[in-house]
Image: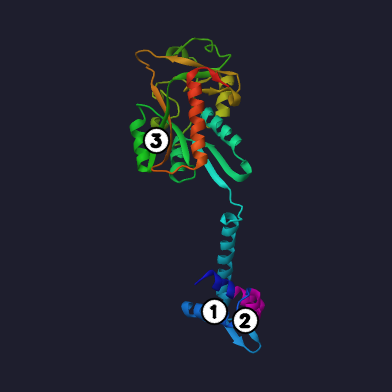
Amino acid sequence: MTLQQLNDVIAIAETGSFHRAAERLYIAQPSLTSAVKELEKELGVILFNRSGKGTTLTADGEGFLPYARSVVMQWQNLLDAYGKTGTHRQKFAVSTQHYSFAVKAFVELTRLYDVSEYEFAIRETRTGQVIEDVAASRSEIGILYMSDFNRKVLGRMLSDHGLAFHHLIDCRAYVYLWKQHPLADRAAITFEDLKAYPCLCFEQGENSNFYLAEEILSTNEYPRMIKCSDRATMLNLMVGVLGYTLCSGIICEELNGNEYRAVPYAEDEENPNSLMEIGFICRKNSQFTGVARQYIYELERYLHAGKAQEGSIQP
């Protein structure tokens, strides 16, 4: 069965004549008749009643015609999207934990490409969903962090999903808070200093655990904790309840505004600091598109510029 044979059947059904169908299709009538007979033989049914009064569909032909039209229509849609003159737009999507630097790199990426020719998407989401998105190819790249605490568990999850982790930068923990917070002007902030204020963290769903937390030092015992699901709400809570969160210290003023500060976390014997290894995940042995390579470049460029001024708010 071929697409041409399906087109033949549709043309005969619509014109009611092999002769008129042959004229519409610009082929010889004997060739059309032969093609339909071969199709009927392959299917094991008769599609048309042929008589001197014209050509009509048999009961089998009536049942076959909608399927033929559907297949031809889908094929035409495919050509319209992906053919030489199609309107298909290249796609690039990234899924990320809630990092302003990931959004900043995405912004810079879109400034380099004609958005009318590309279908871009960025998803700030839970750690588990970042992994699922990349594994299912909904996103080409995922952004997350590893530490000595979560490395074994996340490494196993990535391996089970056929994914690889690629290092971008290492950071120590910073306390991120509103610039008018009582601790904002400190040179460094201890865990003891933070006990009077709520710790803000991103919720990871009902089946989450410490290993999927986006905030470093997630195993510490925080007397007060508030969970939220998006970055804008977290920033509002920093102002409204004098909350804080723990981050990489690489902050984007352009996106988050200049109302916030990142202050170094001062470790002690009971509450040590930890190394935060930020990286991207992708499917193993991936062949990156040019857009993906450019996004990784923008990430590296911004992260290392931020690392050079670690703890300050980057323009």
Dot 2: element = helix
Within the magenta stretch, is there residue 11? yes
Along the viewing direction, whichever of 246 and 25 lies nearer the viewer: 25
- Is 128 on the left-hand or right-hand side of 153? right
Residue 146: x and y in percent read 39, 29
Circles 1 and 3: CB distance less than 8 Å? no
Q: Main secondary structure of the magenta part?
A: helix
Instruction: Find the distance from the CA under tag 1 to the CA under tag 3.
Output: 55 Å
Circles 1 and 2: CB distance less than 8 Å? yes
CA neighbours of label 1 inside 10 A, class few (<14), some (14 to 19), many (20+): many
Give the residue at mark 2.
Answer: 18
**Magenta-drawn segment:** 9-24
Dot 1: element = helix
- Is 155 on the left-hand or right-hand side of 229? left
Residue 280: x and y in percent read 44, 34
Give the residue at mark 3.
Answer: 165
Which residue is at a point 60% across and 55% down the rendered structure image?
A: 86
Residue 187: x and y in percent read 49, 10
Within the magenta stretch, is there residue 53? no
